[in-house]
């Protein structure tokens, strides 16, 4: 009896050990992934030592033994509330086909009556597991991978949602077909049925492999360029995008921004860029399209391991990450020979943070670190430069810490020193001093840095985030968040029917959720369904959330009943004045009278801009928000008139974000004199340190774009 249950105890014990390892304790992808690898090689062992008479019995037991690993993660996830359909599906689709594959291959090798058949099988399985991955890794731009031994790698670990789709089902069907072929090859000509099954498996495999690209198993460059069929060429870039998702003006603007950031980075890192070398920039309509084509959803990325330089960014992330990702592309020039990067993930991301300076729009890297003492010790900083240390913390924490350290090195030492240390993390040779000394020097610069309450709030937010490794249910996505994800996609696609249906479903699912409630009301306002809002709230402003009360007031404003709206705004005024929330600071002023309230509401919910004759009668906050709306709607003459008028108002740092947008667009439109006036006014303000960095970038953009030549070509024809 003990002998029979020993394998179950052994594999169940492995599953128990999973409970002490982050991610593996969850009954989801990571535990299924490891079980698939163990299952494949264990099945090979069993298949190599099994007679044909008992092979089905041994195969069944092999499956049972491996699935004993899942018992402990299953129970943990059950009691933690982490169980999901995708977790069950992954445990079915990853270990089981791998077990069948390993067992059938071992059976085939054994049929040749070779010595050490198990060793031979292990070599073949290792070859399949590693070499296939390596070949795809160095030739394909995608970050998801399929494999017959370990099943599937879905993409970056920052994307929490791992959903089983048709591609995984299709690929694991090919794994099953290989297992079927291996099983019947030894006796393929002993009967007509065996012969038929063997050839059917061969033909089915041929069909599967011919359709790998179409089914999303692989995404070669050619396939990407077919999907993103429009092409825009500049001196250093080839941009690929879908025609319907980028206007010609947007493409020209982003092409210029590509070239601008390119010049910034090669200057900052003192890079001599090879002539005629061009970077491919794949610009996706949204994160969902990028996920489907490359495996990365909200994670923008650069496949630095490829010979061809590439960027992969969704449209909504371009503003925030383009410069950061370009640093990754250009730093390949001084990367190692193995994958064009550094053996330290901290240095890879640290140099991008240091040059792009995009950790926060309000605080510098050093201010964020200085606002959250105690500062990292030497050991903690060295750990942050390693893969395990970097990913064990939340991404924002690791990026910020590494970025501050690298920024110090680039500022205080010659750039060549950093470029020499970068490939192999060899600081001692590059700087002629140990890493500990460099970390100590960096840490000593932090205390004197001026910080304020905003820096503290931003630092607390960043450093309070939890890594995927620190969560009990890292891949558990509640139904509401799944619906919200679908809703966001519908909004981006401007699919009004679907977005309305989904927000109604979300609101019905949880009408007390502030986010769903707010979005539901906003959607009704955009659709001019004021009666629905009045009915839902019974014509009163009793909701305790200030945002909802403001929205109700805006509903009355748009319904041309400003008297009722004013009652709500007036009642809210002392409450909003008492709150510390910065987003309510100008809420009352924006709605100070019927003219301002109507202009604000129509612009916000209906995308309607008032005539320029009305602008002098509006207050400054509304003028600024209208300028931002004009930029959003690409109303350039309107923006220029408004920007001219706004220069007559007193500038305040509260509105720096909109000032930046205005100047950026004026420069792009060639309104250089007007942009220069704005830059002078902005320079005179007492700006935060991070705002000064952003102002300096605007000045660099002005200098660059005034000399920028027209891009080479624009091909709007489908490829």
Image (tube, rainbow, N blue to C red):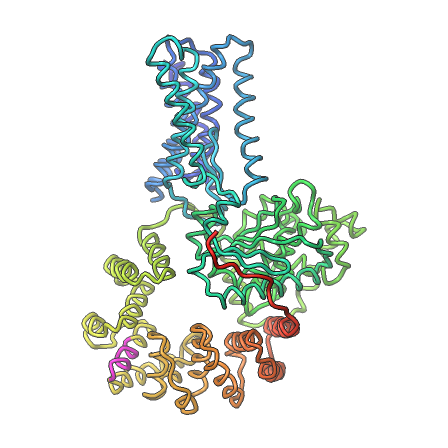
Give residue 577's position: percent from left, percent from top.
40, 81
Q: Nearer the viewer, residue 536 or 277?
A: 277
* Residue under the point 61% across and 83% down: 673
Rendered position, 29 above or below 99: below
Q: Is residue 149 above or below residue 675?
A: above
Q: Is residue 543 above or below residue 167?
A: below
Looking at this rendering, what residue extends furthest in the right direction?
A: 432
Quarter of the image where one finds residue 286? bottom left
Q: Does 559 appear in magenta?
A: yes
Which of 100 and 717 lies nearest the eye of the viewer?
Answer: 717
**Residue at point 27%, 76% (across, down):** 552
Answer with left or right where residue 500 lies relative to residue 224. Answer: left
Q: Is residue 107 left or right of residue 607?
A: right
Asked if residue 19 shows in the view, the reply is no
| Residue 715 is covered by the magenta coloring | no
Residue at point 48%, 32% (across, down): 147
Asked if residue 590 lies left or right of residue 667, the reply is left
- Predominant secondary structure, magenta span: helix
Q: Horizontal and vertical percent for residue 446?
A: 66, 64
Quadrant where the image shows the N terminus: top left
For the point 44% across and 35% down, which residue is it? Answer: 31
Quadrant hosting residue 485: bottom left
Q: Position of residue 106 (x, y in %)?
A: 47, 17
Q: How many marks?
A: 0
Q: Which residues are magenta?
A: 552-560
Answer above or below: position of 494 versus 632: above
Percent across and percent down for residue 206 are 43, 28
Location of residue 413 by image quarter: bottom right
Can residue 620 be seen here? The reply is: yes
């Amino acid at each position: 009896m003990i002998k029979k249950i020993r394998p179950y105890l052994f594999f169940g014990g492995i599953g128990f050990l999973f409970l002490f390892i982050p991610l593996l304790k969850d009954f989801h992808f990571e535990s299924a992934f490891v079980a698939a690898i163990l299952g494949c090689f264990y099945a090979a062992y069993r298949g190599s030592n099994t007679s044909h008479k008992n092979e089905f019995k041994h195969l069944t037991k092999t499956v049972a033994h491996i699935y004993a690993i899942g018992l402990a993660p299953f129970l943990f996830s059950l009691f933690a509330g982490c169980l999901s359909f995708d977790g069950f599906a992954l445990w079915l689709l990853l270990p089981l086909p791998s077990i069948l594959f390993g067992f059938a291959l071992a059976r085939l090798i054994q049929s040749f009556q070779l010595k050490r058949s198990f060793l031979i099988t292990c070599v073949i399985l290792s070859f399949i597991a590693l070499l296939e991955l390596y070949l795809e890794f160095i030739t394909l731009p995608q970050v998801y991978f399929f494999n017959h031994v370990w099943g599937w790698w879905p993409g970056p670990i920052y994307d929490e949602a791992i959903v089983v789709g048709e591609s995984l089902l299709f690929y694991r069907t090919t794994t099953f077909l290989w297992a079927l072929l291996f099983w019947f090859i030894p006796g393929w000509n002993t009967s007509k049925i065996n012969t038929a099954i063997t050839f059917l498996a061969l033909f089915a495999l041929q069909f599967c492999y011919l359709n790998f690209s179409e089914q999303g198993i692989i995404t070669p460059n050619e396939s990407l360029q077919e999907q993103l069929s429009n092409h825009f060429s500049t001196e250093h870039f080839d941009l690929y995008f879908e025609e319907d998702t980028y206007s010609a003006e947007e493409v020209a603007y982003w092409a210029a921004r590509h070239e601008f950031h390119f010049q910034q980075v090669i200057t900052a890192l003192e890079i001599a860029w090879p002539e005629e070398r061009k970077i491919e920039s794949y610009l996706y309509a949204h994160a969902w399209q990028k996920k489907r084509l490359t495996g990365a959803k909200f994670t923008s990325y650069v496949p630095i391991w490829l010979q061809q330089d590439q960027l992969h960014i969704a449209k909504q992330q371009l503003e925030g990450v383009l410069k950061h990702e370009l640093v990754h592309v250009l730093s390949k020039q001084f990367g190692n020979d193995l994958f064009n990067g550094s053996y330290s993930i901290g240095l890879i991301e640290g140099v991008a943070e240091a040059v792009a300076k995009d950790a926060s729009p309000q605080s510098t890297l050093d201010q964020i670190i200085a606002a959250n003492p105690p500062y990292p010790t030497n050991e903690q900083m060295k750990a942050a430069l390693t893969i395990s240390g970097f990913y064990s913390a939340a991404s924002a924490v690791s990026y910020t810490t590494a970025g501050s350290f690298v920024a110090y090195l680039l500022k205080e030492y010659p750039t060549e020193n950093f470029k020499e240390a970068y490939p192999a993390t060899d600081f001692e040779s590059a700087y002629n001093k140990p890493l500990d000394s460099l970390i100590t020097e960096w840490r000593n610069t932090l205390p004197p840095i001026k910080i304020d309450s905003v820096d503290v709030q931003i630092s607390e937010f960043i450093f309070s985030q939890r890594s995927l490794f620190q969560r009990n249910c890292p891949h558990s996505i509640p139904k509401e968040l799944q619906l919200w994800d679908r809703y966001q996609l519908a909004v981006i696609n401007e699919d009004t029917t679907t977005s309305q249906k989904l927000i109604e479903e979300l609101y019905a699912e949880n009408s007390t959720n502030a986010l769903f409630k707010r979005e539901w009301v906003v959607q009704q306002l955009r659709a001019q369904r004021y009666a629905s809002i009045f009915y839902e709230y019974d014509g009163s402003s009793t909701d305790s959330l200030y945002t909802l009360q403001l929205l109700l007031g805006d509903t009355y404003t748009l319904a041309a009943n400003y008297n009722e709206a004013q009652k709500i705004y007036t009642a809210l005024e002392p409450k909003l004045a008492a709150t510390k929330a910065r987003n309510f600071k100008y809420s009352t002023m924006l709605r100070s009278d019927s003219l301002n309230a109507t202009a604000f509401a129509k612009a916000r919910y209906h995308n309607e801009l008032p005539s320029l004759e009305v602008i002098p009668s509006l207050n400054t906050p509304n003028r600024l928000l209208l300028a931002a709306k004009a930029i959003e709607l690409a109303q350039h003459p309107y923006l220029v008139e408004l920007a001219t008028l706004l220069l007559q108002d007193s500038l305040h740092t509260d509105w720096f974000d909109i000032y930046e947008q205005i100047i950026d667009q004026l420069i792009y439109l060639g309104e250089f004199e007007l942009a220069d006036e704005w830059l002078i006014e902005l320079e005179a303000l007492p700006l935060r340190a991070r705002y000064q960095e952003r102002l300096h970038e605007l000045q660099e953009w002005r200098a660059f774009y005034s000399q920028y030549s027209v891009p080479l070509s624009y091909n709007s024809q489908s490829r």
